[in-house]
Image (spheres, helix red, strand yellow):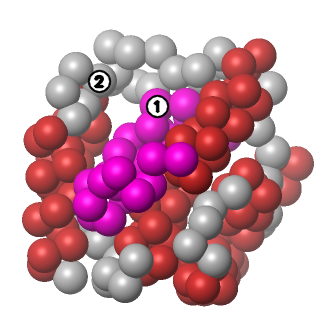
Amino acid sequence: MSEVLDHAKAYDYMFILLGNKEIIEKDILYLHKLFYQNIEEKFAGRYRDIPVFITGSSYSVTKVENIQSEIEDLCKWIITERKNYHPVEFAAILHKKFVFIHPFKDGNGRVARLLMNTALIQNGYLPALIPPILQTEYISLLEKAHEDDSLFINFIIERELES
């Protein structure tokens, strides 16, 4: 039950970021901390210090020693490139980029969806929801996005239209 309440706190925090039209590293860490604090407190809001592998993926995630610089690069990308994309496309690419870094021991997908939806609501869109029935397709398209992200972006556009 506390996991559900903590995820709701992270979801609510998304709306606090509504007026900012920015997403910074502190926000990423805090979103993770909010929903992960009662799952595994010592890892909540902290980058992983162990290597991880995504089960079923052919691709590796960012090495531990590169996480900080990759997150910093992502935050710079958010600031400099946001205006160059349609808001829904930007949100989808942000999601993909974050998941590929995979900075936390666990909960990366949830944070990626929170970041994506933060970007959407900051631009006046509704959150894009991915129902459980589409989970397999969602994961498959993320895997394919390593080579071509157009199908994943279209998937997120469809979720936004349904919202």
Using the image, determine if residue 20 lies above or below residue 148: below
Taking the image as shown, residue 89 lies to the left or right of residue 84, namely left
Q: Quadrant of residue 39?
A: bottom right
Q: Quadrant of residue 141?
A: top left
Image quadrant occupied by the C terminus = bottom left
- Secondary structure under tag 2 reads loop
Taking the image as shown, residue 108 lies to the left or right of residue 72, namely left
Overall secondary structure of the magenta section: helix
Is there any visible trace of residue 1 in the rendered image?
A: no
Residue range of the region highlighted in magenta in the rendering: 80-105
Q: Is residue 98 magenta?
A: yes
For disc 1, the neighbor class at 10 Å (few under 14, some 14 to 19, many from 20) is many
Q: CA distance from mark 2 to mark 1?
A: 8 Å
Residue on which the image places disc 2: 146
Residue on which the image places disc 1: 100
For disc 2, the neighbor class at 10 Å (few under 14, some 14 to 19, many from 20) is few
Measured from the top left, where is residue 153 in percent x and y? Answer: 20, 49
